[in-house]
Amino acid sequence: MRETVGQAGRATVQLMKGAGLALVSYLFIALLLFTAVATVIVVGAGVLPETVLLLRGMAGFKRRQVAAWSGKPVPEAYRPLTGELSERVRTATQDPGTYRDLGWLFAHFGYGLVLAYVSLIVWPVGLLVDGVWCGLLRRPAVVLPLLSRLADLDAAWSTALLTPSPEARRSAQLAERVEELTVTRAGAVAAHGAELRRIERDLHDGAQARLVALSMRVGLAKRAYEKDPDTARKLLDDAQNQAEEALTELRHVVRGIHPPILTDRGLVGAVRALAASSGLDVAVDADGVGGTKAGGKAEGEDVPRAPAAVEAAAYFVIAEALTNAAKHSGSQRAWVELLRTTGRLRIVVRDEGRGGAEGASPAAAPGGGTGGSGLLGMRRRVAALDGTMDVTSPVGGPTVIEVELPCAW
């Protein structure tokens, strides 16, 4: 009997929550009428998207409540309310989820209160009947279990009203995907612009300046050639040095665009070379990722290589992570893992440094393994290829950067 009363109590709490939400729905219906009038006269059109967001919040609360009672999640599907006011109003009025939630709101206002009233009647009758039934006749309770059935009925009706149709779910997923691609495209454009500015700066401050100095020395050498051969020879020697330095600068710029070592050795070989020159003791573990070792010997024969864009993104992410680990983490060791999975390239970079990057915004420099601007650049490179990036870096370490890139092997 005690277990029956406890279950009945939990069911009653569930029903009372529904009744409270139904009473809130009554107030919300008045808000809807105000919003409708304000929208019709245009003056309050800006209220409509916010009202729809509030409606989504109420429906979301009911979904969580039903899931907690039944143990089965209730799916949702909404189009994102973003953009200019006119676009948000259009989305709010055209989203099937809005009308689905409205239908639930009006229906729940009725059955939520009715079921709560019925539960209040069941309690005194149940205590009386079940008390005698169980106490004297030693039989299982028959009335109080009705409360659980009422809560099940509330959950079933709410689930039926709030579950989106397959078409609505696909439409919402498509709209969300378009929104996500819009954001990643903006990030990719910004990253591309930053890369172009970096290349222009490197060419202007490096190779171009050295080529100008080279031209001046050659000109001076030509003038001094007949009158002072020794000076001309010295100027030509300086010009040769300037030419070699300019070539070095150009190679540096080329490596920043697409490192030749990626073409020569593949991702694994390039990462091993990167690890050797990072200043840290870096262990590289590659599983199922194609590449070649120095000297042209195969590393992982018959293993296909990732596309060039994926290899380049992976290389730059690892390079940035190791650079920041060497500069900021205080660790002497790092680990790089490359793993080939079905349709994905997984990258994990870990150091045992001081950490502090966990939860940092991409625009703010954390105090640990990865700097803010570097983290932002890494995220943009990954997002441009529709990949994912997670940073875990509690204070005290370790810092773990996990990246997954789509890859047609």
Image (cartoon, grey):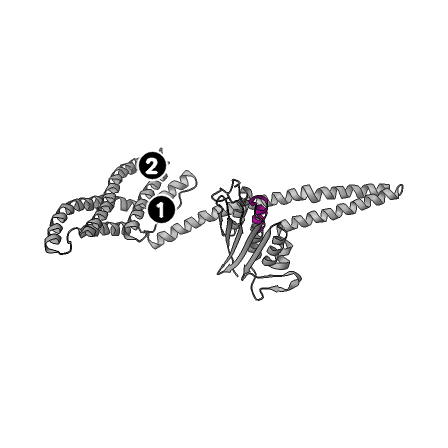
Q: In this view of the protein, can residue 10 be seen by the observer?
A: yes
Q: What residue type is labelled 2?
A: Thr
Q: Position of residue 16 (x, y in %)?
A: 23, 43
Q: Give left or right: position of 113 versus 136.
A: right
How many C-alpha atoms fall within 10 Å of the one at disc 2: few (<14), some, or many (≥20)? some
Tell which circle, 2 or 1, labels the residue nearer the N-terminal end: 2
Rendered position, 326 above or below 346 = above
Q: Give left or right: position of 397 versus 217.
A: left
* Secondary structure mostly seen in the magenta stretch: helix
How many C-alpha atoms fall within 10 Å of the one at disc 1: few (<14), some, or many (≥20)? some
Q: Residue 86 carries which label?
A: none
Task: For mark 2, give the secondary structure.
Answer: helix
Q: Residue furthest top?
A: 43
Q: Give left or right: position of 215 versus 280.
A: right
- In this figure, which residue is indicated by the disc labeled 1? 95
Task: For mark 1, give the secondary structure.
Answer: loop
Q: What stretch is highlighted in magenta?
A: 318-330
Q: In this view of the protein, can residue 225 be seen by the observer?
A: no
Q: Residue furthest bottom?
A: 302
Q: Which of 124 and 313 is in front in this view?
A: 124
Marks 2 and 1, how far apart in space?
17 Å
Q: Where is residue 108 in the image (x, y as percent from the top left)?
A: 24, 45
Residue at 29% across / 44% down in the picture?
Answer: 102
Q: Do the residues labelled 2 and 1 touch (CB within 8 Å)?
A: no
Q: Nearer the viewer, residue 332 or 49?
A: 332
Q: Give left or right: position of 295 versus 313.
A: right
Q: Which residue lies furthest to the right in this view?
A: 227
Q: What residue type is labelled 1?
A: Asp
- In this figure, which residue is indicated by the disc labeled 2? 39
Q: Does the magenta stretch include residue 226?
A: no
Q: Nearer the viewer, residue 285 or 306?
A: 285
